[in-house]
Amino acid sequence: MVIQKRSSATSHINSNPKRWLTLANGIYDACYHHCNGCDDPGYAWDNCALTAGPGKREGVECDAVRMRNWEQEGRYPGLCLWELGDVLRERELGKVRFGMLGWLWLVVLTALAGLMGTWLVYHVVKGLTWGCERRVRDRRDEMRGWPGVEGEFTGDEVQTEEQSAGGVEPERGVGGGCWGW
Protein backbone atom coordinates (compact mmCIF):
# COMPACT_ATOMS: atom_id res chain seq x y z
CA MET A 1 0.00 0.00 0.00
CA VAL A 2 1.35 3.41 -0.96
CA ILE A 3 0.57 6.67 0.78
CA GLN A 4 -1.30 8.66 -1.82
CA LYS A 5 -0.49 12.30 -2.23
CA ARG A 6 -3.63 14.33 -2.71
CA SER A 7 -3.26 17.61 -4.48
CA SER A 8 -4.82 20.46 -2.59
CA ALA A 9 -4.21 24.17 -2.39
CA THR A 10 -3.70 23.86 1.36
CA SER A 11 -1.67 20.65 1.52
CA HIS A 12 1.65 22.03 2.69
CA ILE A 13 2.71 18.97 4.62
CA ASN A 14 5.60 16.59 4.17
CA SER A 15 4.74 13.95 1.58
CA ASN A 16 7.77 11.75 2.31
CA PRO A 17 6.44 8.27 3.28
CA LYS A 18 9.48 7.64 5.49
CA ARG A 19 8.45 10.49 7.79
CA TRP A 20 4.96 9.08 8.29
CA LEU A 21 6.27 5.52 8.78
CA THR A 22 8.70 6.80 11.41
CA LEU A 23 5.89 8.64 13.20
CA ALA A 24 3.70 5.52 13.06
CA ASN A 25 6.55 3.45 14.47
CA GLY A 26 6.90 5.98 17.29
CA ILE A 27 3.18 5.67 18.07
CA TYR A 28 3.51 1.89 18.43
CA ASP A 29 6.66 2.28 20.54
CA ALA A 30 4.91 4.72 22.87
CA CYS A 31 2.07 2.25 23.27
CA TYR A 32 4.41 -0.67 24.07
CA HIS A 33 7.00 1.07 26.20
CA HIS A 34 4.74 3.71 27.72
CA CYS A 35 6.17 7.07 28.66
CA ASN A 36 8.00 7.25 31.96
CA GLY A 37 8.85 10.95 31.92
CA CYS A 38 5.77 12.41 30.24
CA ASP A 39 3.65 15.21 31.64
CA ASP A 40 0.51 13.63 30.19
CA PRO A 41 -0.41 10.36 31.95
CA GLY A 42 -2.76 9.43 29.09
CA TYR A 43 -0.04 9.68 26.43
CA ALA A 44 0.46 5.92 26.07
CA TRP A 45 -3.27 5.23 26.20
CA ASP A 46 -3.99 7.80 23.48
CA ASN A 47 -1.34 6.25 21.25
CA CYS A 48 -2.70 2.75 21.83
CA ALA A 49 -6.21 3.95 20.96
CA LEU A 50 -4.85 5.45 17.75
CA THR A 51 -3.50 2.06 16.64
CA ALA A 52 -6.90 0.34 16.99
CA GLY A 53 -8.28 1.76 13.72
CA PRO A 54 -5.88 0.68 10.93
CA GLY A 55 -5.89 -2.79 9.42
CA LYS A 56 -9.50 -3.74 10.04
CA ARG A 57 -10.38 -3.81 6.35
CA GLU A 58 -7.62 -6.25 5.39
CA GLY A 59 -8.08 -8.56 8.38
CA VAL A 60 -4.67 -7.74 9.87
CA GLU A 61 -4.51 -7.13 13.61
CA CYS A 62 -3.02 -3.65 14.09
CA ASP A 63 -4.33 -2.86 17.57
CA ALA A 64 -1.19 -2.51 19.71
CA VAL A 65 -3.06 -3.64 22.83
CA ARG A 66 -3.86 -7.00 21.21
CA MET A 67 -0.55 -7.54 19.43
CA ARG A 68 1.81 -9.69 21.49
CA ASN A 69 4.93 -9.78 19.35
CA TRP A 70 7.04 -7.41 21.46
CA GLU A 71 10.20 -9.45 21.25
CA GLN A 72 10.31 -9.80 17.49
CA GLU A 73 12.58 -7.70 15.30
CA GLY A 74 9.95 -6.40 12.88
CA ARG A 75 7.09 -6.57 15.32
CA TYR A 76 4.86 -4.02 13.62
CA PRO A 77 3.26 -5.25 10.38
CA GLY A 78 4.07 -3.05 7.41
CA LEU A 79 0.41 -2.68 6.50
CA CYS A 80 -0.32 -1.30 9.98
CA LEU A 81 2.53 1.19 9.74
CA TRP A 82 1.38 2.37 6.30
CA GLU A 83 -2.23 2.79 7.38
CA LEU A 84 -1.32 4.52 10.63
CA GLY A 85 0.98 6.77 8.60
CA ASP A 86 -2.01 7.63 6.40
CA VAL A 87 -4.08 8.44 9.49
CA LEU A 88 -1.35 10.69 10.90
CA ARG A 89 -0.90 12.41 7.55
CA GLU A 90 -4.65 13.06 7.23
CA ARG A 91 -4.70 14.52 10.74
CA GLU A 92 -1.85 16.85 9.88
CA LEU A 93 -3.54 17.83 6.63
CA GLY A 94 -6.75 18.56 8.56
CA LYS A 95 -4.84 20.88 10.91
CA VAL A 96 -3.34 22.74 7.96
CA ARG A 97 -6.72 23.06 6.26
CA PHE A 98 -8.33 24.27 9.46
CA GLY A 99 -5.57 26.86 9.88
CA MET A 100 -6.11 28.10 6.34
CA LEU A 101 -9.85 28.23 6.97
CA GLY A 102 -9.19 30.67 9.81
CA TRP A 103 -7.27 32.96 7.46
CA LEU A 104 -10.05 32.70 4.90
CA TRP A 105 -12.61 33.80 7.49
CA LEU A 106 -10.36 36.70 8.48
CA VAL A 107 -10.20 37.89 4.86
CA VAL A 108 -13.96 37.51 4.36
CA LEU A 109 -14.81 39.34 7.58
CA THR A 110 -12.34 42.11 6.77
CA ALA A 111 -13.93 42.57 3.35
CA LEU A 112 -17.41 42.68 4.90
CA ALA A 113 -16.26 45.20 7.50
CA GLY A 114 -14.81 47.34 4.70
CA LEU A 115 -18.08 47.24 2.78
CA MET A 116 -20.08 48.13 5.88
CA GLY A 117 -17.69 50.98 6.68
CA THR A 118 -17.97 52.29 3.14
CA TRP A 119 -21.77 52.13 3.32
CA LEU A 120 -21.77 53.96 6.67
CA VAL A 121 -19.43 56.73 5.49
CA TYR A 122 -21.46 57.16 2.30
CA HIS A 123 -24.69 57.64 4.22
CA VAL A 124 -23.13 59.98 6.79
CA VAL A 125 -21.66 62.18 4.05
CA LYS A 126 -24.91 62.00 2.11
CA GLY A 127 -26.83 63.10 5.21
CA LEU A 128 -24.47 66.00 5.82
CA THR A 129 -24.61 67.19 2.23
CA TRP A 130 -28.39 66.75 2.06
CA GLY A 131 -28.75 69.06 5.06
CA CYS A 132 -26.37 71.50 3.43
CA GLU A 133 -28.28 71.45 0.14
CA ARG A 134 -31.53 71.92 2.02
CA ARG A 135 -30.19 75.01 3.83
CA VAL A 136 -28.89 76.50 0.56
CA ARG A 137 -32.22 75.81 -1.13
CA ASP A 138 -34.07 77.50 1.76
CA ARG A 139 -31.81 80.57 1.49
CA ARG A 140 -32.43 80.78 -2.25
CA ASP A 141 -36.17 80.58 -1.69
CA GLU A 142 -35.96 83.39 0.86
CA MET A 143 -33.91 85.56 -1.50
CA ARG A 144 -36.39 85.21 -4.37
CA GLY A 145 -38.79 87.42 -2.48
CA TRP A 146 -36.22 90.20 -1.86
CA PRO A 147 -36.54 93.41 -3.81
CA GLY A 148 -33.95 93.76 -6.56
CA VAL A 149 -33.54 90.01 -7.06
CA GLU A 150 -35.22 88.97 -10.25
CA GLY A 151 -35.26 85.78 -12.22
CA GLU A 152 -33.67 82.54 -11.18
CA PHE A 153 -31.22 82.85 -8.34
CA THR A 154 -28.06 80.89 -9.08
CA GLY A 155 -26.53 81.00 -5.64
CA ASP A 156 -23.66 83.30 -6.70
CA GLU A 157 -22.77 86.32 -4.66
CA VAL A 158 -25.29 89.11 -5.07
CA GLN A 159 -24.12 92.66 -5.81
CA THR A 160 -26.38 95.62 -5.78
CA GLU A 161 -25.78 98.62 -8.04
CA GLU A 162 -24.37 100.57 -5.09
CA GLN A 163 -21.86 97.84 -4.32
CA SER A 164 -20.67 97.46 -7.90
CA ALA A 165 -20.42 101.23 -8.44
CA GLY A 166 -18.85 102.06 -5.09
CA GLY A 167 -16.39 99.18 -4.99
CA VAL A 168 -18.03 97.75 -1.90
CA GLU A 169 -17.26 94.09 -1.28
CA PRO A 170 -20.31 91.85 -1.78
CA GLU A 171 -21.80 90.24 1.31
CA ARG A 172 -20.72 86.77 2.16
CA GLY A 173 -23.30 84.24 3.27
CA VAL A 174 -26.03 85.68 1.16
CA GLY A 175 -26.73 82.31 -0.38
CA GLY A 176 -23.47 80.89 -1.58
CA GLY A 177 -22.13 77.80 0.11
CA CYS A 178 -23.46 75.62 2.84
CA TRP A 179 -21.55 76.88 5.85
CA GLY A 180 -22.27 80.54 5.27
CA TRP A 181 -19.72 81.80 2.79
Image (cartoon, rainbow, N blue to C red):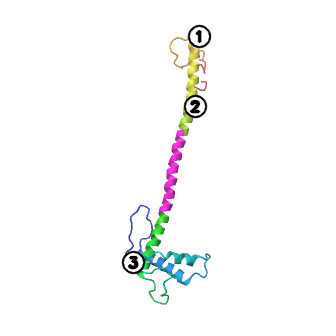
Q: Which mark is first along the chain, 2 or 1? A: 2
Residue 162: assigned label: 1
- Across and down, in percent, residue 97 comes to 47, 62
Residue occupying the far bottom of the picture: 71
Q: From this viewpoint, is residue 175 visible?
A: no
Alpha carbons under labels 1 and 2: distance apart: 36 Å
Q: From this viewpoint, is residue 110 visible?
A: yes
Residue type, numbered disc 3: Glu
Evaluate if marks 1 and 2 touch, with contact meaning CB atoms under 8 Å apart: no
User: Label 3's element?
Assistant: loop
Residue 138: assigned label: none
Of discs 2 and 3, which sits in the foreground? 3
Question: Quick one: quadrant of the N terminus?
Answer: bottom left
Evaluate if marks 2 and 3 touch, with contact meaning CB atoms under 8 Å apart: no
Residue for point 50% across, 65% down: 95
Alpha carbons under labels 2 and 3: distance apart: 74 Å
Callout 2: 10 Å neighbours few (<14), some, many (20+)?
few
- Across and down, in percent, residue 7 comes to 38, 64
Of discs 1 and 2, which sits in the foreground? 2
Q: Which mark is first along the chain, 1 or 3? A: 3
Question: Quick one: quadrant of the C terminus?
Answer: top right
Residue 58: assigned label: 3
Q: Nearer the viewer, residue 119 or 80?
A: 80
Residue type, numbered disc 2: Leu
- Across and down, in percent, residue 80 comes to 43, 79
Q: Quadrant of residue 138?
A: top right
Span colored in magenta: 97-119
Residue 128: assigned label: 2
Of discs 3 and 1, which sits in the foreground? 3
Callout 1: 10 Å neighbours few (<14), some, many (20+)?
few
Residue 66, placed above or below residue 12: below
